[in-house]
Image (tube, grey):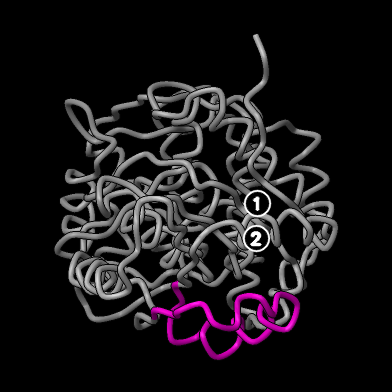
């Protein structure tokens, strides 16, 4: 059986492929209010043939990843008379690639789209894999479709436009990949400084890891679910914060989610040892800011978990049996979930 063809292109050596992909089709560029100012000029400097491409701009932030903004994108695409062989170029982080991918894949029953992730989170995770989605009533990624981008072009120089917080946030998804891979990968990962941009080779390795998992199970029926490690909890934390009119970086929610789900795995007896659990938690405590949770909000957070799109009969997790050995489809009693969250709160 042939390996699926990679649609990820990395660094300056992919410039020629990018020019070819964007000169053969009518292009519209989707940005947010941050990337239109800080990233679009960088793109146009290298690719002047895009100077006349129409630019669509939405407000930045997770709170704007919703159907109202999708509708505005549809209206702009209609106004521009884009046809089914047109291409939407998504220039931004996870909000832009999620929303832009969803809008493109549903406009006129689907036009092509290209992702250019401008955040570390996007480069190693969000822009890869063809999961397009928007939030509904502050519930994360409830409306979406599976639709692979035509290509993903990763240009690490966009990391120069990011704050330390955004860099640190992206490292959390890379931490997840290391925990899913092996004890050796986890040991090597801990040697890096999460306040600095990763080496290009490490970014590409993480992008390829995400791609390989996706290619083995595009529609998320089995192996791809390992990538949900930390995310059942993380999405509930993000939704709870959005309901308070607050927004936390996705990576910080993921780090908290991995901490809590390591505790959960140890308590329900998946096989994760207390030593591995505490090693993971100690690393997260020293490397990532703590997500503030009010004790009287724990039940509300669990209630939000019940609306997670991955659930089967009850709240469903992907957990570790040990470092490098993930399990999927775990449905623990809610008393254990509550205890794990409380442990994080008081740690």
Magenta part of the protein: which range?
Answer: 30-56
Q: Residue at x 59, y 49 (%)?
A: 151
Q: Residues within 10 Å of mark 2 (few under 14, many from 20)?
A: many
Q: Which residue is nearer to you in this view: 338 or 324? A: 324
Q: Residue at x 81, y 35 (%)?
A: 184
Q: Which residue is nearer to you in this view: 347 or 64? A: 64
Work out whether 257 lies above or below 72.
above
Q: Residues within 10 Å of mark 1 (few under 14, many from 20)?
A: many
Q: Which mark is residue 174?
A: 1
Say which quadrant the N terminus sits in. Answer: top right
Q: In the image, residue 60 lies at what x, y percent?
A: 40, 80
Work out whether 2 lies above or below 259.
above
Q: How many marks?
A: 2
Residue 241 lies in the magenta-colored region: no
Residue 46 lies in the magenta-colored region: yes
Residue 282, quarter of the rendered image? bottom right
Work out whether 200 lies above or below 311.
below
Q: In the image, residue 117 lies at what x, y percent?
A: 59, 64
Looking at the image, the residue that sits furthest to the bottom is 37
State yes or no: discs 1 and 2 in contact (Cβ < 8 Å).
yes
Q: Which mark is residue 119?
A: none
What is the CA distance from the residue labelled 1 to the residue labelled 2?
Answer: 5 Å
Q: In the image, residue 140 lies at what x, y percent?
A: 28, 56
Q: Which residue is nearer to you in this view: 276 or 53? A: 53
Q: Residue at x 54, y 46 (%)?
A: 150
Q: Secondary structure at mark 1?
A: helix
The reply, left or right, for residue 45 in relation to residue 122 is right
Q: Which residue is nearer to you in this view: 125 or 103? A: 103
Q: In the image, residue 109 lies at what x, y percent?
A: 26, 45
Q: Residue at x 49, y 66 (%)?
A: 27
Looking at the image, the residue that sits furthest to the top is 1
Residue bearing the label numbered 2: 171
């Amino acid at each position: 059986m042939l390996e699926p063809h990679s649609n990820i292109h990395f660094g300056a050596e992919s410039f020629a492929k990018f020019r070819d992909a964007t000169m053969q089709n009518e292009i519209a560029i989707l940005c947010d209010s941050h990337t239109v100012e800080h990233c679009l000029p960088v793109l146009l400097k290298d690719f002047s043939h895009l100077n006349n491409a129409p630019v669509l701009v939405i407000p930045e932030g997770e709170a704007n990843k919703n159907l109202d903004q999708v509708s505005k994108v549809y209206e702009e695409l209609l106004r521009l008379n884009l046809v089914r062989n047109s291409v939407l170029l998504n220039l931004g982080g996870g909000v832009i690639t999620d929303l832009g991918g969803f809008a493109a894949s549903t406009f006129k029953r689907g036009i092509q789209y290209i992702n250019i992730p401008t955040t570390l989170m996007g480069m190693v995770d969000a822009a890869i894999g063809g999961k397009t989605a928007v939030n509904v009533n502050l519930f994360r990624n409830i409306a979406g479709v599976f639709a692979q981008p035509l290509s993903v072009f990763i240009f690490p120089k966009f990391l120069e436009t990011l704050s330390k917080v955004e860099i640190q946030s992206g490292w959390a998804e890379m931490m997840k990949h290391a925990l899913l891979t092996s004890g050796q990968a986890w040991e090597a990962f801990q040697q890096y400084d999460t306040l600095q941009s990763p080496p290009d080779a490490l970014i590409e390795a993480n992008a390829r890891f995400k791609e390989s998992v996706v290619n083995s199970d595009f529609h998320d029926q089995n192996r791809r679910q390992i990538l949900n490690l930390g995310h059942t909890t993380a999405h509930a934390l993000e939704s709870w914060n959005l309901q308070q009119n607050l927004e936390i970086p996705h990576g910080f929610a993921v780090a908290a989610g991995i901490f809590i789900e390591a505790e959960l795995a140890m308590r329900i007896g998946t096989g994760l040892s207390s030593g591995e659990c505490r090693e993971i938690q100690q690393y997260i405590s020293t490397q990532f800011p703590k997500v503030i949770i009010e004790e009287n909000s724990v039940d509300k957070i669990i209630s939000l978990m019940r609306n997670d799109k991955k659930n089967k009969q009850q709240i469903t997790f992907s957990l570790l049996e040990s470092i490098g050995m993930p399990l999927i489809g775990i449905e623990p009693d809610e008393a254990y979930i509550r205890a794990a969250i409380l442990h994080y709160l008081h740690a």
